Image: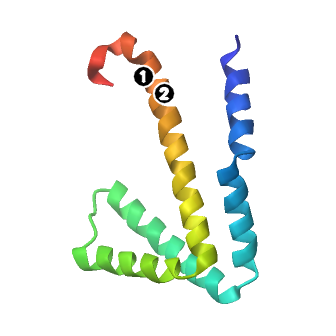
């Protein structure tokens, strides 16, 4: 059994998943709505900035986090963006589950610390 072949099979299955198809479909619809696309792009840019700051140890102020939450709520009023966010969340859960399955399969090597 070749682990890399299995990884490629998993990657192919992810690409063909309902969640990825839903993300692709939602993105195509958002692309046709310039206002929604701009709002989403602005949100993603701010989200990336906040995440980078957090990774470097600079925790954002509570008011900044609340502002991001409000932006998310406003964006979620757009049905296509909400559809995108929902599909992204479902895909994220799948990826977390796969990571857990892999980590659990190796737990015997390191004891129960994983």
Give the labeled residue for mark 1: 104
Q: Residue at x 57, y 58 (%)?
A: 88
Q: Quadrant of the C terminus?
A: top left
CA gap between label 2 and label 1 equals 5 Å
Instruction: Specify whether 17 is left or right of 50.
Output: right
Q: Secondary structure at mark 2?
A: helix
Q: Are marks 2 and 1 in contact (CB under 8 Å)?
A: yes
Location of residue 36 (image quadrant): bottom right
Instruction: Specify whether 48 is left or right of 107.
Output: right
Above or below — where is 101 with respect to 30? above
Residue 68's x, y, as percent?
A: 38, 76
Residue 109's x, y, as percent?
A: 38, 11
Q: Residue at x 44, y 25 (%)?
A: 103
Q: Residue 101 shows which numbered tag?
A: 2
Above or below — where is 48 with respect to 16? below
Location of residue 106 (image quadrant): top left
């Amino acid at each position: 059994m070749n682990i890399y072949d299995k990884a490629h099979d998993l990657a192919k299955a992810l690409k063909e998943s309902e969640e990825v198809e839903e993300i692709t479909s939602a993105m195509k619809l958002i692309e046709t709505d310039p206002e929604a696309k701009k709002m989403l792009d602005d949100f993603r840019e701010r989200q990336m900035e906040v995440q980078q700051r957090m990774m470097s140890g600079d925790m954002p102020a509570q008011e900044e986090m609340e502002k991001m939450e409000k932006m998310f709520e406003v964006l979620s009023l757009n049905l296509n963006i909400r559809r995108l966010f929902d599909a992204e969340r479902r895909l994220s859960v799948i990826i977390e589950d796969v990571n857990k399955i892999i980590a659990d399969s190796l737990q015997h090597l390191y004891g129960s610390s994983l």
